[in-house]
Amino acid sequence: MRGSILAAGILAAALAGTASAEETTLTLNTPGGAVQEGGRAVLWGPAAKKLGFQVKEETADNALDVLRLEVGSNSVKTDIIIMSGYQAAIAGTEGMLEPIDYKAVDASGFLPGTAAPYCVGIYGYAAVMAWNTKTYAKEAPSSWADFWNVEKFPGKRSMRSDAEAQVEMALLADGVAPKDVYKVLGTEDGIKRAIAKIATLKPNISVWWSSGAQHGQLMKDGEVDMTTGWNGRFQTAKEAGGPVNYTYNQGILTYDCFAVTKGSTHKAEAMKMINEMSSAQSQAGLTKYVSYGPLNQGAYKTGIISKEAEAVLPTSPANSGAMVVQDIDWWAKNNDHVQQLFEDMMTE
Amino acid sequence: MVALNPPASLSVAQADNGGRLAWDARLERLVSFAFTLPCLAVVALCVLVPCAWLFFLSAFGSDGKASLENYQRILDGASYARIFITTFQVGLATVAACVLIGVPFASFINGLPPRRSVIFLAAVLLPFWTSLLVRAYAWLVLLQRTGIVNSVLMGLGITKAPLELAFNHFATVLGMTHIMLPIFILPVLGAMRNIDSALIRAAASMGASRSYTYRRIFLPLAAPGIAAGAILVFVMSLGFYVTPAILGGGNVNVISMRIARSLSNYSNWGAASALGVLLLVFTALLFALSYGVQRVLLSRQRS
Amino acid sequence: MSSRSAESVRIEAVSKMYGDFRALDDVSLTVEAGEFVAILGPSGSGKSTLLMAVAGFIRPDRGRIFFGDSDIVRLPANQRGFGVVFQSYALFPHMDVMANVTFPLQVRGVPQDAARRRALAALDVVKLGGYGSRRIGELSGGQRQRVALARAIVFEPKVLLMDEPLSALDKILREEMQIEIRELHNKLQITTLYVTHDQREALTIADRVAVMDKGKIVQLDNPETIYRRPVNEFVARFIGEATILPLAEARAVVSGDLGAVAPSAYALMVRSEDFCLARSGDENGWLAVGGLLRGVVFQGDSWLLQVDLADGQAITARAQKHFSAEVGALEVGQTIDLHVQRDRVHFL
């Protein structure tokens, strides 16, 4: 593994080595798509202009692979990288990221837990519960306890074929208070309790979804009556007139963020850029491009976000209070173990 | 001394000539070997190198040090054994379904006059050219809770509640059988076409009924083809990803899905490679076993 | 292998078309009980079609086939109970010799011990005692032929049908087997229909020979009559070597008295070996024809003399070995007189 990284890194270094310029050029790695398009328009575009930097965009499917390649081969060219909070936590513990300098980055207006030691949130999204409005026409389920209550709400369920966010939901359904979820998960018994709770629902789970497109389709087709999933998909299905509704109550809020590559030659400039891009104005502007919620709560006071838009965004003051912000550090530490137990349960 | 040697002129001439002829033969072999070099290079590049890479990657832990932790994890985790078992179960069920459907169907096609057999063969082969993804979703459209089959059954009043046809082993095996059937039927039909029709007539002339002839003569002679088809189907089934992922709905967990998860979710090349290596080893063992079985079957026929 | 009461096979007005091709054209033929009839003809003459119709593998378009007194034309092959020997032997490659030979007995439900005993006896008859456990692949062509024969007679069929059974064997083995089959028939007295394209084989082996051409039987007679008195030019040419001269021409080139000639006759036929270089015995009753010697070919047991007649027609004569002195005196290019006894001339 290391050998290949070394070889590829030397190649990359040889190709990129001549890029030192009179003016600062920051290399920014994005997942592409709407995030890249919107980010160029309202995040790094304006920020670079203001600071007098140049931005070179790169895209990658998997940010962790990019870091492993560049940091592992000691040929860092990416300065700022967009990744999930969970990935950033892993990369941080593996020593592939610079700690965020919160003297340079103002994150005071952020939702608690969304400005982490190694990364600063850009937008938030939530794993929530959605249901078929025809099946539950009289009374809609409103909590994870209802999701697990197959007597009161009979019907087919779907959960993710991955433990992420599902174990939190299980504990909430089992009566754990939102603020205590990660305290309980901090013990082996707590993890087992969450897995066991999911196991009790297994006979009613007809599909384990593996992608957002899939759980959106399952709800639209009426193939399952209730599912876990991401708020954006359900909002789309709802707007398209599907028999779908969802609630932010007890949703698991998580986010994507900016991080700085360990060994970046433009560390200070990167922090300045991130600070600009984390402003209320910037984050509010991004909602025009993606259906994710700004994490800087000031964004909702800029007047850029309409009341109607605010009502459906997961990070709005009205919605975020009912949610649990995902503890990415806990996931970074426990992922392999939890996934293993989850898989044992799933395949049993 | 002199007396022991054959006449000098004769022996020299013979030795000379023999050496030259042997050289010619060697040159001829070298030239024909040279023609295979591009092919060998492609095989080495596309098969051997990636395989070696797979073995190499699997021998490193997540900390980048050489270790057997990837294999240790597979031994320790309860789910891995179950995933292997599920993979083999699905493969075997697909083989069984292919044999049950494919052998009678191939026999039927084999018995048709050439022009009509082409039509039926085309009907089997046609789905071959549509994508795996399309076929899996087509089955989903048919089988899911709100799908065509359930709609028709409930519309006709045959069933009250929708049957659970999708997202299980049944749907997975059905979808895989659909895909593998042409791959199974071709070698089987090939073997059947090679059966001398005089043998069937001979059996009839000796008083054997159609079904007796089919059981005692036709099927045993088609057996090597059936075995070849079954092995092909089984080995290919072990690597299926799209069909079990879509039609299994997470309830059918096969190795390829686990490998994909290791890669896409955790970027754990070592763990994924270890699974790949184990799959490769199991497949190779099965191949060796089936090769032996086939050789026995064939040797029983042709001395 | 005890002798049994034989039955006759009677073919009545059987026709079979393949598209526009007339494979069998109103064929009638009776094989008497215990008789050995060879069907002789070039490929495409319909001889195999006729045999397959009797065996039950081909359904005629019209006509009847009697076995004894019963019409079997609609009876399936497996209910006719005829022994069939195929050109390709049709031995089951996945069974050993014993299993092949006991197959028809197993079909009939003969107990295993008895079946084995009878198979051993049948193998003895074809001189393959001790070969029971051999695989088919281990046998030579001649041995396979014998196994096929044993398998066809082991269930004591009342009719034996053979479709060019010796055509795949080399000449010496073929001639050996002809004698053996003939002897086997003498012993078992099974009513036998034997298809061959080899005229010598047909003459050697059969009680009577049916010569077929274009889907019809053109002559049915004992071997000597077929040879000596062919009914038409086709039979004359197909069987043996013959010189055929139209009568008008013959009268011009032949010296001597042709004698009484039937009004319908249009040509005369002389077998090549009936030509002599000199007259012997009674000087009377000889005819002669003169020509130019074009070539002499030594063929082991005889010489072939190629002679051009005065009117340009080329004929061949065959001089037996004991004429070596006379042949040695000949020179190519010289004129030569060929003599033939009057009663050796056949009028067509």
Image (cartoon, rainbow, N blue to C red):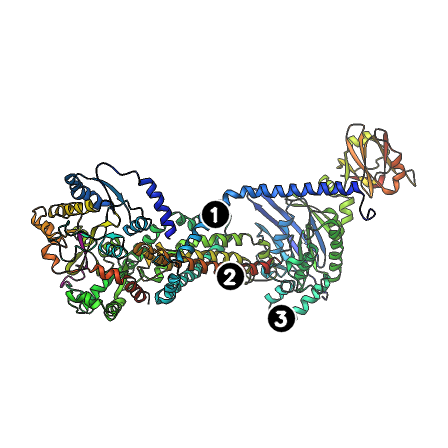
Q: Which residue is mark 2?
A: B289
Q: Which residue is mark 1?
A: B43
In which chain is the residue bearing label 3?
Answer: C
Q: Give the mark nearer the N terminus: 1 vs 2.
A: 1
For disc 3, the neighbor class at 10 Å (few under 14, some 14 to 19, many from 20) is: few
Mark 2 belongs to which amino acid? Leu
Nearer the camera: disc 3 or disc 2: 2
Mark 3 belongs to which amino acid? Gln
Same chain for the residues at labels 3 and 2, yes or no? no
Q: Is residue B158 magenta?
A: no
What percent of the width, then of the height, locates residue A4? Answer: 38, 49
Residues at marks 3 and 2, CA–CA distance in whole angstroms: 34 Å
What percent of the width, then of the height, locates residue C221? Answer: 74, 49
Residue B99 seen by the camera: no
For disc 2, the neighbor class at 10 Å (few under 14, some 14 to 19, many from 20) is: few
Same chain for the residues at labels 1 and 2, yes or no? yes
Residues at marks 1 and 3, CA–CA distance in whole angstroms: 55 Å
In which chain is the residue bearing label 1?
Answer: B
Q: Which residue is mark 3?
A: C112
Say if mark 1 contacts mark 2, CB within 8 Å: no
Query: C284 and A194: which one is in front?
Result: A194
In which chain is the residue bearing label 2?
Answer: B
B203 to the left or right of C324: left
Nearer the camera: disc 1 or disc 2: 1
